[in-house]
Image: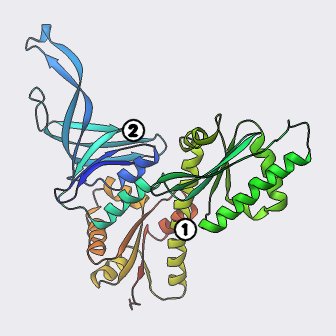
Amino acid sequence: MKIIFQDIKKGEVKLLTNSLDDLWFLSNIIDENDLITGKTIRKIRLGEDERNTKIIKKVVTLEIKAEKIEFHKYSNSLRVSGKITQAPEDIPRGFYHTFDIDDKTTIKIRKLVWPKYQLQRLKESTEEKISNILICALDREQATFALLTPSGYKILTEIEGQVQKKEVENKNTKDFYLDIAKIMKEYVDRYNLESIILASPAFWKEDLMKEIKKKYSQLTNKITLATCNTLGKNAIEEVLKRKEVESVLKKDRTTRETQYVEELLEKIAANKEGAYGIKEVKQASDAGAIKKLLVTDEIIHKLREENKFEELDKIMKAVDQQKGDVHIISTDHEAGKKLQGLGGIGAILRYNLNY
């Protein structure tokens, strides 16, 4: 997700979605009564006489007041419906319209107040593409190392070798692979990295992986293989556009969310600073005792569909105002499913409460 501009004092943020994963973030950011502005296709009726009426499709900019937010993760679509509040003169206000948001959509969201946890979600969504990840792109002649950071990416080093054809295994080949693996290990230790993307044309990455497993086996569980068809800086930029990067970033987010849920489960098992279920969590919220609030995306969508989201929304906003952290947990992974089994909501507390 890219933030085009934001003015939090006015409650306005304009966004560009870059991936299907961004739709999941937006589904947890857009609330009922938010004002959503974007370009859309609207049918326009020309002419007053029914026999001579002509209907055309026109690209227009509309603003709607959100009433229904539907995210369908299996069809990769986010639909936001509501009444039109601003439109060109030939389109009447008060009629319903639905924005179909995909992975290349620009929209503006206007809220009366942006809760801290939603601003944090926005920040996370923009940083999903720029986590600290080591990228190594190689072929038979050179290897380029780059670090993906919060300020973009930077080339760390480039080395040259003389790797022969696959059929000819010789000392030069193995020495070049070992040089690459050694540098990779040094960067992982220096930057404390958990993820590496190893990319190449053809079979070079697979051959390198064989040597890594022999000499630096501790790196293997950090590596994701990708394909590139270019070299140097161009190869790094090519890799950044590939789905493998998204999968690595999603894995990083899953790791963080799993840690939160496991911490909650440990607190509950020890009968310490933990609460779960809407009733217990509300009591903890009323007491100002919540340090971390964990809510599944599934319970949010379910309560919205049943028009019962108001109570949960009040809890989330109360925790935010009390300077607690609100984390929305995906049910796509096992930890999220565990939290859903506890009612879809749990809290790590600042101190223990007696229920």
Residue 302 is drawn in which quadrant?
A: bottom left
Q: Could you say which is closer to the camera, residue 121 or residue 314?
A: 121
Q: List x then y, in percent, for residue 114.
A: 24, 61
Check residue 237 in the rendering and tell me which mark sits there, or answer none. Answer: none
The amino acid type, in three-letter code, at marker 1 is Thr
Residue at image coords 74%, 53%: 180
Q: Residues within 10 Å of mark 2 (few under 14, many from 20)?
A: some
Left or right of 301: which side holds 240?
Answer: right
Q: How is the image coloured?
A: rainbow
Q: In this view, does 158 lie above or below 255?
A: above
Observer-nearest residue: 284 or 144?
144
The correct choice, above or below, for 131 with respect to 278 in the image is above
Q: Which residue is drawn at 77% across and 42% down?
A: 204
Residue shown at 70% from the left, 41% from the top: 200
User: Which element carries disc 2, helix, strand or loop?
Assistant: loop
Residue at numbered disc 1? 258
- Left or right: where 254 falls relative to 222: left
Label ID, residue 102 = 2
Query: For the residue labelled by badge 1, is the local secondary structure a helix, a strand or a loop?
Result: helix
Above or below for 189 versus 203: below
Going 55% across and 74% down the picture, which residue do you hit? 262
Left or right: residue 233 compared with residue 288: right
All told, the count of numbered labels is: 2
Q: Quadrant of residue 105?
A: top left
| Camera-side residue of 127 and 81 | 127
Q: Alpha-carbon distance for marks 2 and 1?
A: 28 Å
Q: Which amino acid does label 2 sit on?
A: Asp
Height in image: 45 above or below 116? above
Percent x, y of residue 167: 90, 36
Residue 313, percent from left and from top? 28, 65
Residue 172 placed where, x, y %? 87, 46
